[in-house]
Image: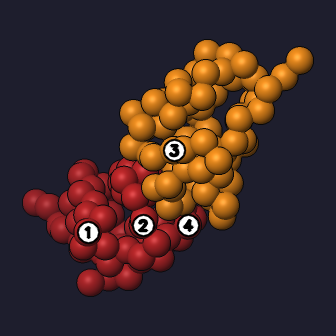
Chain colours: A red, B orange
């Protein structure tokens, strides 16, 4: 059983940002996998994580995220 | 005795890029100190490094640099 959360992420400008966002998401409890697209401003997170925790983790890293 | 080389660097979009550029410059032989400005697209390098080696190091990291 696996849930997927898709986030719209703003503030990413380069592949360094993509890596930072991916690492921030992967550090959240329950995350199994995080895929991040710079072109689409999107992060797709698989696992049982709390969406609010995902958004908070990105805010702490300097990015704005909303559920999409 | 210390030389200073100033480079115009294009391709930096965020503070992650600034850090990557600084690290790439600091890894070049002869570099004592590297300061990087995102706002000015500029890197100031102190030491006895070969300017061509500095430019090559940045190209390998995905940035374009010219002597300014």
**Circle 3 chain:** B
Q: Tell me which corner region of the image, top left, top right, bottom left or bottom right, holds residue A6.
A: bottom left
According to the picture, the residue beneath numbered tag 2 turns out to be: A12
Q: Earlier in the sequence, mark 4 or mark 1?
A: 1
According to the picture, the residue beneath numbered tag 4 turns out to be: A62
Q: Residue furthest right?
A: B1
Task: Please indicate whether residue A65 sits to the left or right of residue A8 in the image.
Answer: right
| Residue closest to the eye, A64 or B5 | B5
Task: Please indicate whether residue A29 sits to the left or right of residue A42 in the image.
Answer: right
Residue, x 17% and y 67% (percent of image)? A3
**Circle 2 chain:** A
Q: Nearer the viewer, mark 1 or mark 3?
A: 3
Q: Are marks 4 and 2 on the same chain?
A: yes
Q: Are marks 2 and 3 on the same chain?
A: no
- For numbered disc 4, what is the local secondary structure? loop
| Residue closest to the eye, A11 or A51 | A11
Residue, x 51% and y 34% (percent of image)? B55
Label 4 to label 2: alpha-carbon separation: 9 Å
User: Circle 1: is it few (<14), some (14-19), or many (20+) Cα within 10 Å?
Assistant: few
Q: Earlier in the sequence, mark 1 or mark 2?
A: 2
According to the picture, the residue beneath numbered tag 3 turns out to be: B65
Relative to A47, say whether B65 is above or below: above
- For numbered disc 2, what is the local secondary structure? loop
According to the picture, the residue beneath numbered tag 1 turns out to be: A39
For the residues bearing labels 4 and 2, Cβ distance under 8 angstroms: no
- For numbered disc 3, what is the local secondary structure? strand
């Amino acid at each position: 059983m696996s849930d997927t959360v898709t986030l719209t992420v703003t503030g990413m400008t380069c592949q360094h940002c993509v890596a930072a966002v991916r690492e921030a998401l992967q550090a959240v409890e329950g995350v199994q996998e995080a895929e991040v697209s710079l072109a689409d401003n999107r992060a797709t997170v698989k696992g049982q994580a709390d969406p609010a925790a995902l958004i908070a983790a990105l805010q702490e890293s300097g990015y704005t995220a909303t559920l999409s």
